[in-house]
Amino acid sequence: MPLIQVEAPTNILTKPEQDRLIAQLSNAVLKAEDAPVDDAGAQSLVWAYYNEQPEGSVYVGSKNLPQPPLRIAVTTPEGALHEATRHSLVAEIGRIVDGIVGPFEDRLNHWAMLYEVSEGSWAGGGQIFPLAGIQAAMNIKAA
């Protein structure tokens, strides 16, 4: 049950590129969580937000850049990822962004930030969703 939030400069991507970015990020997170990427139930639990930042609102090193980096935040339940899957997810995010946005000269084209919600703290619809329940809903087989 990952949550993906992308902050990007206004008009850096076309709508088809935004759709491709979100689809590829969603699949990468599902793969990192060991969920079946082609499973409709797993896909339905990946929520993603693409938020454009107004021109002139992002600063790097106290300077306003005409093409600032993307910020990609991935939030998962505690225990959904482990060290190896975090590393592979971050590497895959890098490949995805490079493939869609392209590299930036002499600087990063994105930041990737991984967050975990502690067990018993992921909730919606008036109920708490423990990791085991989330994994069952996503058809993730226990290792």
Image (tube, rainbow, N blue to C red):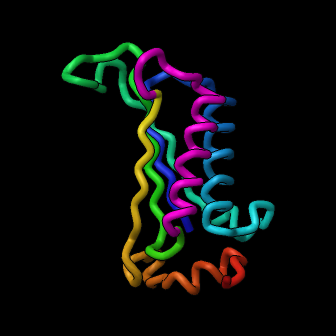
Residue 19 falls in which quadrant of the image? Answer: top right
Q: How many marks?
A: 0
Name the quadrant of the N terminus.
bottom right
- Does the magenta portion include 84? yes
What percent of the width, then of the height, locates residue 100?
63, 28
- Does the magenta portion include 68? no
Q: Is residue 120 above or below residue 108?
A: below
Residue extent of the magenta highlight: 82-108
Which residue reaches farthest left?
62
Q: Is residue 82 above or below residue 46?
A: below
User: Could you tell whether 32 is left or right of 66 in the image?
Assistant: right
The overriding secondary structure of the stretch rendered in magenta is: helix
What percent of the width, then of the height, locates residue 135?
62, 79
Which of these two is toward me, 71 or 137? 71
> What's the residue at 41%, 22% (across, down)?
107
User: Could you tell whether 63 is left or right of 44 in the image?
Assistant: left
Which residue reaches farthest right?
38
> What's the residue at 46%, 44% (across, down)?
72
User: Could you tell whether 142 is left or right of 48 in the image?
Assistant: right
> What's the residue at 51%, 52% (across, down)?
4
Residue 70 falls in which quadrant of the image? Answer: top left
Q: Is residue 85 above or below residue 14?
A: below
> What's the residue at 44%, 84% (across, down)?
128
What percent of the width, then of the height, locates residue 81?
53, 68
What percent of the width, then of the height, locates residue 15?
63, 29
Name the quadrant of the C terminus.
bottom right
